[in-house]
Image (cartoon, rainbow, N blue to C red):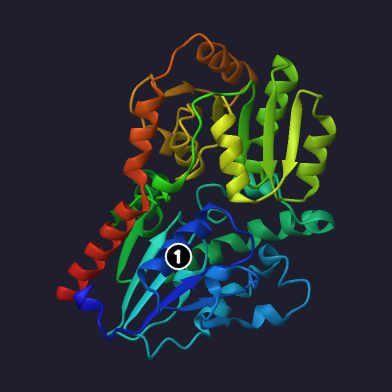
Amino acid sequence: MQNLENKKIALVCDWIKDWWWAEIVLEQMLEIFPKADIFTSIFFQENNPIFNDRNITTSFIQKIPFLNKSHKLALFFRPLAFESFDLSSYDIVISLTSAESKWVITKPETLHICYCHTPTRYFWSHYHEYINMMEFGFLNPIWKWLMPKIVHKLRIWDFIASKRPDFFIANSENTAKRIKKYYSRESKVIHPCLDIENIPFEIVKEDYYFYNGRCIPYKKFDLIVDAFNENGKKIKIATNTPNKLYDYLKSKSKPNIEWIFTNNLEYINKLHSKAKAFLFPPEEDFWLVPIAAMATWTPVIAYWKWWALETVVSWKTWVFFKEQSIESLNNAIEKFESLEFDYLKIREHALKFDKKVFKNEVMEFINKRLEN
C-alpha cells in the first residue's frame, strides 16, 4: 500500500445497473481503494450502500430516456461516452470491463490497468450467437440487418482501444487467451474472488438442483429447462432478468421447475447451501457462481469447457458433461446421483478464491508496475 499513498485513483465501469457477479469485482476494488472515484456510462444503484459518499460520474447516456435503461441499444454512444471522461487529474485508472470502458483516454504518465472480464463478447467470441439471439424486441430485424454491415469497423475501433491500457489483467486463462488472440496483448491472470469465509453453509442437502444468473442466451437457461422437463427432477432457477426469454422459458417449464425472481445474494446463498448440486451449463470465461456454490459445500455439475477446467480439484467435487445437449446433461446428472462427495474438500477448494487472495494479488500487481 505504500506506493499508493497520495495517488488519485479512478475506477471505470461499462455500466452499473444490475447487481451480479461482475459487480462483486467492483465492490472488492472499492474495498481496496476506499477513496477511488467512479466513472461509468450509466448508474442505477442509488440505494446500494457501498456507493454512499462516493464520487460517481456518469456519461451523457444517463440523461437519454430509454437508452439509459437499455444500455445495449446505446452501443454506438458508449465509445464516445468513455472518451468524453476527463481523467487527466488521475494517477491510476483501472477499467473493469467486458465492453467499452477501456476506451477511456489517459495521459502518458497515468497508469491505466484494464481488468478484463472478456474482450467485447458481441464483437468477437460470441458474435454469431448474439446475432442469432438478439434481445432488442421489435428492433431485432433492424439490428440483424445492420450489425454485419458495421461490425468490422466496430472491431477496428475496439482493437485500437485495446492499446490504451498500459497493462491487462485477465479474469481467467481463457480470457487471457482471448485478449492475446483479439487484442494481441499479454495479460496477468487474477481470478475474481468472494468473501468465502463469511458465506454460510449446510451439510444437509434438500432434494433439488439449483441454477442462477442473468437469463440471457449464452447462459443456457434453455438447456436447463429442456433437460429438466425431460428428466422430471426438481430444480430451482433464480434470476432477476425480466425479458422475453425468461417469460418463454417459464411458460414452458413443467411443475418440477421452480422459478425464483430475485438478486438477493443472501437468499441465493441459502438456495446454494441447501441444493444437492449446482448446475453450470454455459461456456463461460469466468463465473463466480460455482465458487459460491462450492463455498456452501455444494458439488457442481459443469460443462467441460474453458473456465470450469481451471477450477477442477477432482472427480469428487465436480461432475462434467462434454456437450451442451439434453442427453449429455441428463447423463451427467445420473452419474452425479451415483457418486459420493467430499464436502470438506469442496469447501477447502473454494477458500482459494477468497477475496483476501484477490486483494493481495491486485495490490502486488499494481505496486510492481508503479516501481518500474
Query: Residue 205 occupies which quadrant of the picture?
Result: top right
Q: Position of residue 262 (x, y in %)?
A: 70, 48
Query: Residue 333 occupies which quadrant of the picture?
Result: top right
Question: In the figure, is residue 94 to the left or right of 205?
Answer: left
- From the viewer's perspective, is residue 56 above or below residue 271? below
User: Of residues 249 and 1, which is closer to you in this image?
Assistant: 1
Q: Position of residue 114 (x, y in %)?
A: 38, 66
Q: Neighbour class for label 1 at 10 Å: few (<14), some, many (≥20)?
A: many
- From the viewer's perspective, is residue 39 above or below residue 115? below
Q: Residue at x 51, y 31 (%)?
A: 202
Question: In the figure, is residue 218 to the left or right of 336?
Answer: right
Tell me the residue that label 1 is attached to: 96
Q: Amino acid at mark 1?
A: Leu
User: Of residues 294 and 325, which is closer to you in this image?
Assistant: 294
Q: Is residue 306 visible?
A: no
Question: In the figure, is residue 137 to the left or right of 55?
Answer: right
Query: Residue 220 occupies which quadrant of the picture?
Result: top right
Q: Residue at x 54, y 56 (%)?
A: 123
User: Of residues 45 and 68, which is closer to you in this image?
Assistant: 45
- From the viewer's perspective, is residue 236 above or below residue 63? above
Question: In the figure, is residue 138 to the left or right of 273?
Answer: right
Q: Residue at x 49, y 57 (%)?
A: 24
Q: Position of residue 275 (x, y in %)?
A: 58, 28
As drawn, the residue found furthest toward the left would be 372
Tally of marks: 1
Q: In what element is the residue under mark 1?
A: strand
What quarter of the picture does the N terminus occupy?
A: bottom left
Q: Residue at x 61, y 36 (%)?
A: 271
Q: Position of residue 146 (x, y in %)?
A: 71, 61
